[in-house]
């Protein structure tokens, strides 16, 4: 049986295999076990080096900034298209129904991203079953419709109230109110899911509610302003309840499970809400002939909202989720920019501007992690000692190893096969 021996000088035999080990192996193992251990150690070390590589962090941050800007632009442009569509075709329920059907494309697009980023390729059916475990053990049409129907109702309700609010208040106000959805998510999670109490998030929720009140009464006691803000709050509350219920059912929310759920929501909207034509005969909504429906505006709006939801739910695959959340906050200035430079109808009082600023501060406070105070103190102390590393700032993929900083890295031991 061939044995392994450690050599310092190069050998004239086969190419040596380099192992980054703290010390040479003290005992001699069989050849097959050594090769397996060689591959596993090399893979582990390569992953560790990639996570601590500044170039990879810069690449993810750059990708996050680009995706965050795309989130803001898609929402602002989609909201502007929704406003124009409502002017030419005032049928909000039909518009929501049409846009919800586009959610069927969620899982195919997620599977395409999965193929581009993952090394292990799986069949679409296998990946769908893996991501849809929260719907039940047996994946049948009945279980899918039964599990996704409540979420479909909340999704349609949120979109319907959003369009009604858009008919009464400016786009900037609607975007600001919908940013308060994160505060409602925290309150519902704290009450319903017994999440950890955090004083900073309570303060952030109070700031969000204060901003909502200022928006409602910013232009005086005007009925349209108060009604529009109330409808926006209802839309944000329905969206928050959607997220909390999904988290309660699926546990730790993953992009695959979110894509399956939203595809099922689109399927339920297509199957269960096809009776939307009843609204036409009951004159609740008036539909003009099909040739007069602005299909171009409807398709642009539906595609932009689909891009927005794709980036929000699947953007974490390519970058840090905090940068995607920053893009949601940027929807407020993006909507203001669209009003100012595209439609030239921006009319914003000082009270409403202050309300949007307060809501933005509350939103940023809600993005702080649970151990933000300990992490900040730890990073400041590390920076003060001069032991700065990239993973001490990012802190989303690796954990600081203080023992490894004080100890020098061992030199690699060269192992050759005789």
Image (cartoon, helix red, strand yellow):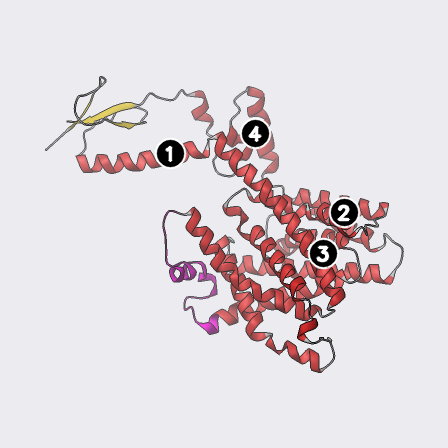
Which residue position is annotated with label 1?
46
Which residue position is annotated with label 2?
341
Q: Secondary structure at mark 3?
A: helix
Q: Position of residue 31 (x, y in %)?
A: 18, 34
Outermost residue on the top side: it is: 9
Q: Residue at x 30, y 37 (%)?
A: 40
Q: Quadrant of the N terminus?
A: top left
Indicate yes or no whether the magenta region holds residue 122.
Answer: yes
Q: Quadrant of the C terminus?
A: top left
Vertical arrangement, residue 362 with respect to residue 146, above or below: above
Marked residue nearer the N-terminal end (3 or 4): 3
Which residue position is annotated with label 4?
378
Q: Position of residue 234 (x, y in %)?
A: 72, 62
Q: Residue at x 86, y 62 (%)?
A: 223
- Inter-mark Cα distance, 4 to 2: 45 Å
Outermost residue on the right side: it is: 220
Residue 409 appears in view = yes
Which residue position is annotated with label 3?
80
């Amino acid at each position: 049986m061939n044995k392994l021996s450690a050599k310092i000088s190069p050998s004239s035999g086969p190419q040596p295999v380099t192992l980054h080990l703290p010390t040479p192996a003290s005992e001699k193992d069989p050849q097959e076990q050594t090769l397996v251990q060689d591959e596993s150690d090399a893979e582990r070390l390569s992953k560790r080096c990639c996570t601590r590589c500044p170039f990879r962090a810069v690449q993810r941050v750059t990708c996050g900034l680009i995706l965050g800007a795309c989130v803001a632009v898609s929402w602002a442009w989609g909201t502007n298209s929704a406003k124009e569509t409502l002017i030419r075709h005032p049928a909000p329920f039909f518009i929501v129904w049409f846009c919800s059907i586009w959610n069927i494309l969620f899982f195919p697009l997620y599977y395409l991203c999965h193929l581009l980023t993952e090394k292990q390729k799986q069949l679409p059916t296998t990946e769908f079953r893996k991501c849809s475990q929260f719907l039940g053990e047996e994946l049948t049409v009945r279980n899918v419709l039964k599990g996704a129907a409540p979420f479909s109702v909340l999704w349609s309700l949120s979109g319907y109230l959003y369009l009604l609010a858009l008919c009464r208040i400016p786009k900037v106000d609607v975007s600001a109110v919908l940013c308060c959805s994160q505060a409602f998510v925290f309150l519902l999670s704290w009450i319903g899911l017994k999440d950890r109490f955090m004083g900073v998030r309570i303060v952030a929720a109070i700031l969000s509610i204060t901003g909502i009140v200022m928006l409602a009464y910013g232009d005086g006691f005007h009925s349209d302003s108060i009604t529009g803000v109330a409808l926006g709050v209802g839309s944000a509350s329905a969206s928050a309840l959607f997220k909390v219920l999904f988290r309660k059912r699926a546990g730790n929310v993953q992009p695959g499970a979110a894509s399956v759920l939203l595809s099922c929501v689109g399927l339920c909207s297509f199957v269960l809400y096809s009776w939307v034509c009843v609204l036409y005969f009951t004159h609740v909504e008036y539909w003009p002939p099909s040739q007069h429906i602005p299909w171009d505006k409807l398709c642009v709006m539906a595609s932009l909202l689909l891009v927005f939801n794709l980036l929000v739910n699947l953007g974490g695959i390519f970058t840090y989720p905090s940068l995607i959340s920053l893009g949601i906050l940027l929807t407020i200035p993006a909507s203001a920019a669209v009003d100012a430079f595209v439609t030239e109808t921006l009319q914003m009082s000082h009270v409403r501007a202050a309300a949007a600023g307060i809501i933005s501060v509350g939103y940023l406070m809600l993005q702080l992690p649970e151990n933000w105070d300990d992490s900040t103190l730890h990073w400041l102390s590390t920076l003060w000692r001069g032991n700065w590393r990239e993973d001490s700032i990012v802190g989303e993929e690796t954990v600081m190893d203080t023992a490894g900083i004080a100890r020098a890295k061992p030199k690699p031991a060269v192992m050759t096969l005789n």
